[in-house]
Every structure is written in C-alpha cells, then in structure tokens.
Amino acid sequence: MSAPTQNPDAQGTETAGPLTRWAWYAYDFGNTAVEFAIPLYLTIWIINDLGVTAWAFGLASALSSWAVGLSGPYIGVSADENRTRRLWFTVSALVATLLFGLLPFLPRRGAAALFASLVVAMTANYAFQVSSLIYNASMLKAAAGVNVVSVSSRGMALSFAGGAAGVLVMESLVSGRLLPGISGRAYAMLPAALIFLACCLPGIFASKLWQKKDEPVHVPPGQLHERMASLWRESAQQHKAGWFLAGYFALNSSVMGLTLYLPLHVQVATGLGGMRLLLVFALVVLMSAVGAVAVSLLSPGKTLVRRLILGGLILLGLNALVFSLASSLAWMLFFASVHGLLSGALVPTVRGAFAQIFPADYQALAFGLFGAVQRVSQGAGALLSPLASAAGGSSTTAIGIAAMGVLALLGAPLFLRWNYGKTAGP
C-alpha cells in the first residue's frame, strides 16, 4: 500500500508564518557563499598552492558527490520516518562549518598532510550537501499555504545575493585588506564557513520548520527498499517523476556546464582577465537573481510552472547555441545576461515544483533523490570537455557552450512527459 499524496499547500498552514519563512530563506543566503567559495578559492588553493594534482582533486570531488547521491535518499527516508530532519540539519551544518573553518590551519607539508587536507575538504563538502537536501525538505513547512514555487524562487534570489556578499568578504580577507597579516586563498573558506553557520542558526532554532514528535507519518509496509519503491511507484504513476528527474538532469547539466565554460569562453575570445572577468561573472549572478525574483512575483500555478520550464529550457538552449558563435564582448555580455536570467528563473521553479511531487511527510526522501540527480548532473558538463578539447584553439570553449545548449534542448521533451498532477496546487 503506497502513501497517500497530500496537498502540500495545506501542510503546516496552522503553524508556520513569515518569520519561519525568513529563517528558511536565511540558509539559502549562506549556502551560496560556500558554493561560490569552492570553485573560486578552494579548488585553486588545493591544486595550485598545495600542489594536489587536478585529477586527484577531481576524483575526490566526484567521490564526495557520489557519496551524497548514494546516501541522500536513505538519510532522507530515515529523517522523514524518525522525525529527525532538524537533527540531521543541525549536525551536518555544524560538521561542515567546523571542517571548512579548520582547513587553513591544517599542516601542509608532506604527502600525508596533503591527503588529510583533501579528505577534510571532501568530508566538509559531503556534510554541506547533506544539510542542503534536509533544508530543502522543509520547503513546504516554510511555504505554509503560500505559493511554493515563489518561496523557492525568493530563497534562490537571496542565495545569489549571499554568494556575491560572501565573495566580497572572502576577497577582502585573502587580499589582506580585512585583517592585516592574514592573506592568501587558504583563508577564503573561513569567512565562508562563518557566514554559512550564521545563516543556518535561524533555521536550526525555527521549530515550526521541523517535524513534531507526535506528527503522523504514513510508513508503507516492508523493508527500507520496499518502502522507497512503494513511494517511488506512486510518484511515478501520478506525476511521472522519472521523466521529471531526467529533465532536471539535462537542465542542471546544461546550467552548470555553461557556467563552467562561460568565463573561459569570454577569456579566450576577448582576452579579458582578472577583475574584469570577475565582473562578467558578477553580471551573470545579478541576472540570475533578477530571474528568480521575477518568478517569485509571478506566484505561478501548475499551468504556468509547466510553461515556464518548457519555454525556459528551449530559450536557454537556443541562447547557448547563439552564444557559442559570438565573438564580440558586447554580444557575449548580452548572451551571458540572458543565460543568467533564464537559469535563475528555471532552477528555483524546478526545485519548488519537485517539492509537490512526493508526500509532504517524505520530503527529505524527495530531496535526497533530487540531490542525487543534482550531484551527478553537475559533472556531466565537465565530461564533455575532452570532446571540446579535440577541436583545439579558441573553438574549444565555443563547442562546450554549444553542447550545453543541446543538453538544454534535450531536457524539454523529457519535462514534457511530466505530469504535474491534480494535487500540485492551483
């Protein structure tokens, strides 16, 4: 017997309110400070400064992501059925903060020290990602009758603002302007970790975000695998969830891959570097925030959500294909802005829509599956790099961007098979 699908718009309406929602938003603000710190500082520090080979760091990062993907659904179902989402969130956030903050103070001489730094960094990343999937599981609690996609989009808009603010603080610290005597990329993760912890605290103490011990949870019969299979069959039958996740795989691969190739393409084609190249990246982040805010103001119902996803994917793909042909800085800035606008609108829309596919009492399981697809798909764009490199020269990044456009277009027919369902809200 499968768990009954519940109307998420009715969940938690008698408990949560605006303050609870802002506690939920706070995490998004701090989350992206870490998300930006990892590629902009941590990766470069470990490879360039510590001397860890790129392939070893890449393999370690992949193992960390795969660990989240494999364990996330099991952690989720445990947190759902035992009503321990708050505990999982608190512990994972504290572990991530402690380990990220510890990194600059670890020994750096010798192979053993380098290995230890790599293990600590990847363990911190694992805990950080676990906190994210548990955080997403409380989205319906935070919404409390408000449009779920709008709540997801407001959180995502704040995340871009938090990421930009975090980079400003980190850049000030690593340059030595914030604290005299302290400089270098090694210290970038320390302010990122502290910002992350500060933004986690409101959620940790917002009791209305979390399950109550007496809150009923419908537990399907059977062993763990059987219970998960039962819940998956229901979501697959009612909403064609498999097609949704396949579409999200294509979407996230495209967005993350194009974000990887974008600054490289601008640098190769125009010669921009340093602060000017960082400003191009900042423009994309700003436009992403604009896209997320636009969706939050729309408060889209299920028909508009479907149109936003399908139309946005097609436009994202076409924009990438044209972007790959651009050579002037003006056109590159335009297409980069469009990419930021569309990706900023699409990602939170998809996140909010997925929250409405699974039963409300199994949201951690839902976002365990969502996180698994997210972690795996983030590497898919980078996997196309050898194909692009075969062309050589300045066409390498252009081929990479075009490939991301094709991925986005492939996502549209996959999402077309998805059924939002009668219980997914207005």
Image (cartoon, grey):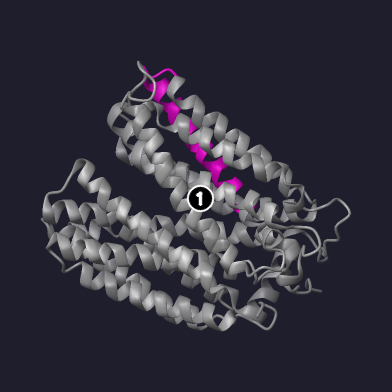
Q: List x then y, in percent, for residue 24.
A: 63, 52
Q: Residues within 10 Å of mark 1 (few under 14, many from 20)?
A: some
Horizontal relation, residue 270 to residue 189: left or right: left
Q: Mark 1: which secondary structure? A: helix
Q: Which residue is drawn at 72% across and 46% down?
A: 206
Magenta-drawn stretch contains 282: no
Query: Which residue is label 1 attached to?
Result: 66
Q: Is residue 195 shown to the viewer in this render?
A: yes
Q: Which residue is drawn at 51% across and 64% down?
A: 348
Q: Residue at x 12, y 62 (%)?
A: 328
Horizontal relation, residue 209 to residue 177: left or right: right
Q: Which of 54 and 272 is in front in this view?
A: 272
Horizontal relation, residue 308 to residue 370: left or right: left
Q: Which amino acid does label 1 sit on?
A: Trp
Q: Which residue is drawn at 42% across and 42% down?
A: 165
Which residues lie in the magenta part?
Answer: 106-134
State the quadrant of the C terminus.
Answer: bottom right
Q: Nearer the viewer, residue 129 or 136?
A: 136
Q: Say if 114 sits above or below 66 in the image.
A: above
Q: Nearer the viewer, residue 231 or 147?
A: 147
State the quadrant of the N terminus.
Answer: bottom right
Q: Nearer the viewer, residue 419 or 63?
A: 419
Q: List x then y, in percent, for residue 47.
A: 31, 33
Q: List x then y, in percent, for residue 181.
A: 35, 15
Query: Which quadrant would residue 48 be assigned to in this image?
Result: top left
Q: Is residue 410 shown to the viewer in this render?
A: no
Q: Say if 113 sits above or below 252 in the image.
A: above
Q: List x then y, in percent, for residue 396.
A: 17, 58
